Image (spheres, coloured by chain):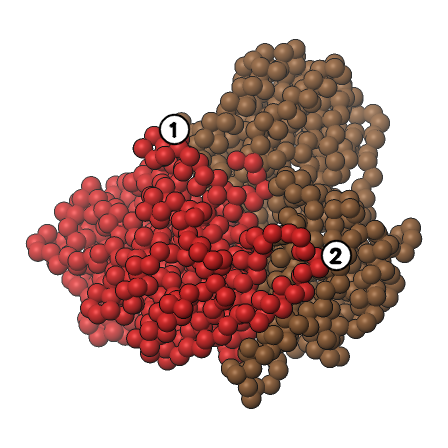
Chain colours: A red, B brown
């Protein structure tokens, strides 16, 4: 039996688009002599559909699309993912289902049993868990179908207050008892740089434990902040990977089940390194945010600092340099070098730029606020006014020319609230809001891997917001090398302050950082969507009360 | 046996504060000869704790507080709600538990079985459902304890694609089989103006169905956007309400169980009308957002329109007029009357105000953008610049004087995207972002119920953003009387466009409105927290993909 893994880039709710992607892959698979083509979880709707699952017309369209695909499945069967209505009078309204389509009909349905409801996942919001486990016979083979989390009943524990078994049932154990020849897993497994190896280990572990080959098909591409890396794989029963599909691109791969069962040979794909993975993920995130929302052009503020430099390079690579505009918006406190460095960078990558001084509007605000503010010292108010004037200009550009403003704040700043709401925190999409400053430098080095694109002086100079004379980030923050270590432990690893201190970090520093994180929830609440590359990004995956004493 | 219902206003994570509230109520109950004092769901942590439940130190403090309360329970028992760790190696990390404390010990624990995971609720994110049902004997009575949703296994169906039974188990049925003399329900049941009567019906229905008295204790007060109305009640076995505690205030009420069992007499509390409920809810929301985050003073932009007028009155009532500042920020397009009306209002309620023209900064922006924008028509860009200049000034005021900026956008505008991101959409808290324009008028009338506080001309003039000459809301929107009817059906009732049209609304109007709602998700994503008064507010209870084609 020949099997095809179809790793595609779906758009949420775009039933026509998704149908046409799927049809094309069915044709290709048929052309390659395949018997069974496998698509990813909820491929018909795209993942994550969120509360569109509560719209009855959305569900009707999904059902019509499903039947259209079934009609395409002549001489070949397909495994697709779709929401189906739970017709029982009790329980959640839907099931998250995998269906086998053949000769115009649905010949088998599996329901997802383990519904992730942590971090960015909310599946129990919509779906009733499946409670029955069955296999289907196809071409004299017994095949089990699972959906994503179904094979993640036991997970490695990255979290300080974590737990490896969040579920009370193991679908793999249940299904293995039925002695299938193959376990299929259709996934919508979002990227995080810590999860690539973990995911391989999960599927390899299941194959080895049960002595049954496992194939996993993931989607690729981004939907808003969630980026899917693909990396679909076929794992032999001894736990070795026969083949892994590429990361961050569509791919359709056909192979013979005998090859998977035989246990000989391996063509394991090499996994890109940490920085390259993040780089590719961010390109995917930018490209799809624009492409899927029907926009082509981006604008951003280019300060002469490292963050906006990296975002500019990413945007130019993802969208084409002709589609990106950089605005240099110097104030009375901006150094001459900042603008010069920004101009060099813009020229290096060939993007349009304009230089607009914010001095006149700043003076106008100073003037009209003088009566109210007289007798008071300049403070963060005046710094914020400058940042907000820049946002007014950038958003005016965005409005006038139909560009999307890219936000250039990094995760270290976002964590400690080092940023101005409605100022440098503005934008339609935050590109590096899940990237720590130390990783921003790594990405800069990666961008410069072949030649100097980002001028060296942008990389080497001390970070400064340039909102008052002689200001440096380290005036109010610990060095980023320390800050990022503490942030990673507190945010990604969920360690409380005392546990971090006991690792040897300075008590005062840790407590200050933790207090800054907690007291700035209100700012992050209004931040743009942030491309997620870590196991814990700010946004829907981290839900903190704003008004709390803790 | 004498029983006390303790309806209190907790703050999330404020263990010391919550402990002291609870201790005081225990003392009061003891003084009233009570045998059992009942507190609300998760009273020790405050509700909703959200992802603070993933912080191990938070859980340790909750546990310590629980034991402190147990020590207070001498000569009296207490029912309290707290998270407890699930020590089983399998399943979610916590249970949402109710515990009976007596003479320093925990003498009984009930675990919440039905975990709401819809709208604003995410309980399955943290909790393993309870699967066992037991009763405890106390003073020769058999008592069952349930937690909030446990008695909501069957709900009336407000939703077009709804379902009345989301769960596959009924805790009330299970417990009724054990023949308890009383069913206790500890709740954290947020306010919505549609749910007051529904909630009464749920508890009355359970009492009547099983012929067992039911007491329900809810929390009161607001935590960020969620407002809890209290309204705790004691229901007799015939389904009549013996007593309902007041709405939106703390209250401790003691009664005799015999009274509840006897079936004679009723002291049902009258429920305030629609507009008064919303008015009180919003006052509670403002007061607690400020009080619980340690702020006293508010600033807002007073345009001379109805929305900011109503928000100003609410803020002055909630915070004291001495703590509220109104800024009138006229542009070249503002009518003289708008400023005059605003001044009359500010004087009527005795709040400080300043008038600051935005003309100079507007000119400065026009000037610096002229080279880039030359040859292009004025459009929404210039309108947005004005709205954003106002936000710069209001936020400068907020920064300089330590005020919180109140947002004054209403739900009708937020729905169709009629507002400027980083402009009039700015603010620390959205006061009326869940109030439709037609209800804003009702609240204005309520505010003016005894005398004219809001000048009549503010109420009667045609709504206008005054961002270009002769602009009126109805230029680009249907009349609010129609708009709000369509919005309510689409948002609260979840009806698809075709169902709304089939009710007799104009096809073109409905389709335009629905399209405006869907295409403005990106704006609402960055909106401030919105005080929730309806069954479906924008924010955490409505999760829509930004990049989707539907």
Q: Are marks 1 and 2 in contact (CB under 8 Å)?
A: no
**Given the current orientation, which residue lies at the most extreme bottom position?**
B375
Q: Residue at x 59, y 20 (%)?
A: B69
Closer-to-camera residue (B188/A447):
A447
User: With respect to residue B7, does A21 lie above or below?
Assistant: below
Tally of numbered discs: 2
- Residue B27 placed where, x, y %? 69, 17
Q: Quadrant of residue A327?
A: bottom left
Task: Give the CA distance from mark 1 to mark 2.
Answer: 56 Å
**Closer to viewer: mark 1 or mark 2:** 2
- Residue A30 placed where, x, y %? 24, 72
Chain of the residue displaying label 1? B
- Residue B502 horizontal side relative to residue A549, left or right: right
According to the picture, the residue beneath numbered tag 2 turns out to be: B326
Circle 1 Cα neighbour tier, 10 Å, few/some/many (<14 / 14–19 / ≥20): few
User: With respect to residue B526, does B232 lie above or below?
Assistant: above
Q: Disc number at residue B88?
A: 1
- Residue B501 horizontal side relative to residue A389, left or right: right
Q: Residue at x 23, y 46 (%)?
A: A201
* Badge 1 element: loop
Circle 2 Cα neighbour tier, 10 Å, few/some/many (<14 / 14–19 / ≥20): many
User: In the rendered structure, which disc, 1 or 2, sits on the residue that comes first in sequence?
Assistant: 1
- Residue B189 placed where, x, y %? 64, 40
Q: Quadrant of residue A328?
A: bottom left
* Badge 2 element: strand
Q: Residue at x 79, y 29 (%)?
A: B242
Q: Disc number at residue B533?
A: none
User: With respect to residue A258, does B288 lie above or below?
Assistant: above
- Residue A511 placed where, x, y %? 44, 36
| Quarter occupied by the N terminus of chain A | bottom left
Closer-to-camera residue (A49/A292):
A292
């Amino acid at each position: 039996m020949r099997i095809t893994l179809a790793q595609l880039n779906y758009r949420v709710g775009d039933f026509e688009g998704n149908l046409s992607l799927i049809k094309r892959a069915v044709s290709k698979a048929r052309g390659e002599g395949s018997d069974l083509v496998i698509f990813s979880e909820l491929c018909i709707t795209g993942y994550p559909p969120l509360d569109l699952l509560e719209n009855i017309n959305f569900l009707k369209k999904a059902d019509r699309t499903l039947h259209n695909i079934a009609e395409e499945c002549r001489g070949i069967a397909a495994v697709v993912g779709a929401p189906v209505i739970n017709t029982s009078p009790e329980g959640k309204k839907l099931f998250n289902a995998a269906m086998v389509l053949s000769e115009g009909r649905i010949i088998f349905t599996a329901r997802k049993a383990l519904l992730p409801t942590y971090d960015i996942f909310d599946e129990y919001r919509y779906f009733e868990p499946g409670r029955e486990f069955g296999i289907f016979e196809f071409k004299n083979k017994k095949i089990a179908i699972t959906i994503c989390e179904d094979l993640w009943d036991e997970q490695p524990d990255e979290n300080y207050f974590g737990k490896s078994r969040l579920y009370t049932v193991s679908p793999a154990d249940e299904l293995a008892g039925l002695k299938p020849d193959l376990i299929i897993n259709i996934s919508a497994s979002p990227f995080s740089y810590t999860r690539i190896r973990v995911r391989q280990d999960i599927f390899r572990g299941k194959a080895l434990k049960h002595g049954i080959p496992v194939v996993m098909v993931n989607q690729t591409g981004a939907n808003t902040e969630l980026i899917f890396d693909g990396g679909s794989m076929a794992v032999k029963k001894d736990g070795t990977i026969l083949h892994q599909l590429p990361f961050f691109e569509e791919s359709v791969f056909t192979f013979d089940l005998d090859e998977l069962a035989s246990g000989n040979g391996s063509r394991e794909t090499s996994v890109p390194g940490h920085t390259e993975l993040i780089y590719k993920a961010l390109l995917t995130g930018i490209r799809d945010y624009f492409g899927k929302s029907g926009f082509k052009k981006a604008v951003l503020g280019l300060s002469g600092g490292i963050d906006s430099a990296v975002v500019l390079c990413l945007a130019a690579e993802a969208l084409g340099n002709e589609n990106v505009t950089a605005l240099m918006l110097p104030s009375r406190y901006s150094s001459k070098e900042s603008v010069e460095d920004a101009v060099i960078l813009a020229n290096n990558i060939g993007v349009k730029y304009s230089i607009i001084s914010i001095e006149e509007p700043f003076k106008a605000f100073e003037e009209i606020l003088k009566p109210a503010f007289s007798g008071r010292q300049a403070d963060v108010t005046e710094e914020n006014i400058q940042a907000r004037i820049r946002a007014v200009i950038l958003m005016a550009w965005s409005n006038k020319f139909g560009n999307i403003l890219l936000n250039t704040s990094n995760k270290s700043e976002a964590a400690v609230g080092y940023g101005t709401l409605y100022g440098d925190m503005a934008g339609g999409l935050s590109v590096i809001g899940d990237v720590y400053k130390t990783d921003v430098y790594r990405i800069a080095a990666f961008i410069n891997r072949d030649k100097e694109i980002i001028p060296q002086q942008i990389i080497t100079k001390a970070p400064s917001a340039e909102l008052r004379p002689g200001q440096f980030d380290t005036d109010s923050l610990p060095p980023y090398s320390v800050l990022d270590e503490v942030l990673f432990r507190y945010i990604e690893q969920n360690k409380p302050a005392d546990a971090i201190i006991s690792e040897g970090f300075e008590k005062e520093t840790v407590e200050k950082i933790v207090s800054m994180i907690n007291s700035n929830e209100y700012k992050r609440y209004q931040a743009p969507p942030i491309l997620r590359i870590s196991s814990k990004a700010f946004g829907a995956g981290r839900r903190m009360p704003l008004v709390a004493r803790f």
